[in-house]
Image (cartoon, rainbow, N blue to C red):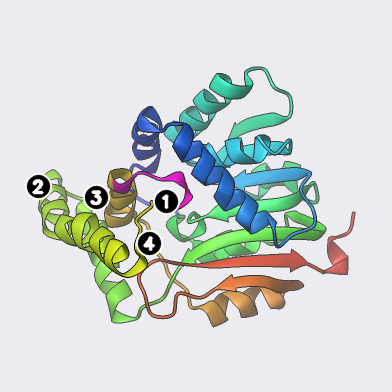
Amino acid sequence: MLISVRFAFGKNWLNFLKRANNNSIEIASKSINDLLHYTDLNENFLDVGCGSGIFSLAARNKNMNVASFDYDEFSVKATQSLKDKYYKNDKKWNVFQGSILDKEFLKKFINKFDIVYSWGVLHHTGEMLQALENISVIPKRGGFLIISIYNDQGYKSIYWKKIKKLYNTSFLLKILIILIHAPYFLFIVPLKKILFEQKFQINRGMNLWYDYLDWIGGYPFEVASVDQIINFFKQRGFKPVFIQDINNRLGCNEYIFQNINAEHEN
């Protein structure tokens, strides 16, 4: 299915990367380490929808063999630039342009990766269920699938889907939507974290402004409940290893599944 209205994810990541620093990389590395704590394999890492490439870099810094791919040419450019900066001509990190919806493209990755990582990506494909289906056949038996998917908030999710689509249809609407929602996301949310958590830090090494644009404009946009995702992967031979359920809050639920499906063996 061809999506005519789509947020410029790759351009947003390129702009973020221009301002990223060592602190961003350190925070991204910590987020990868925290997730890998739940796994016992860390040799081959596939980054599905690599975006800025910062998490591929974090995995490579752990001496993993890394493959990164993204549908968006500018995300591929961002990731390649990061690789060239830190691991130029490195044969243990390969960057591709391709789609999780392209089964022919995916054949080269099936049963070759211990860790298949796709953070905040599959719900932006326009065909989330097909993307989930396609990614489920990639991990080795015993390997791990690490994903995050937007939480289904019912009517709130319907509202955000409409806002995100409008954001991408008109420059004037884009400016208006940014101005209306910026006070909450750029000031009230950080203030709440400072007051109630005594700290404010952008998770996973991201930048507040570019993370905001990614949220407010991120279309296509689909959501799922925790039960829907767990049941989907259980039916395909995966067991849940870690679930971060944000309940009815805005954002992504986080999942780690292990492939225990005997049919996945080479």
Direction from residue 54 to residue 156 in the image, left or right: left
> What residue span does the magenta drawing correspond to?
202-208
Q: Are marks 2 and 3 in contact (CB under 8 Å)?
A: no
Residue type highlighted by circle 1: Leu
| 140 sits left or right of 68 in the view | right
Counting other residues with Cα less than 10 Å from the Cα at mark 4, is it few (<14), some (14-19), or many (20 or more)? many
Q: CA distance from mark 3 to mark 4?
A: 12 Å
Q: Residue at x 39, y 38 (%)?
A: 13
Contact check, label 1 and label 3, Cβ < 8 Å = no
Which residue in the protein does label 2 denote?
172
Viewer-side label of 4, 1: 4
Tell me the quarter of the image containing the C terminus.
bottom right
Residue named by callout 4 = 221
Task: Give how far across and how far down residue 169 sits, in percent.
Answer: 20, 50
In terms of secondary structure, where does tag 4 sit?
Answer: loop
Labels 2 and 1: the sequence-earlier one:
1
Amino acid type, callout 2: Leu
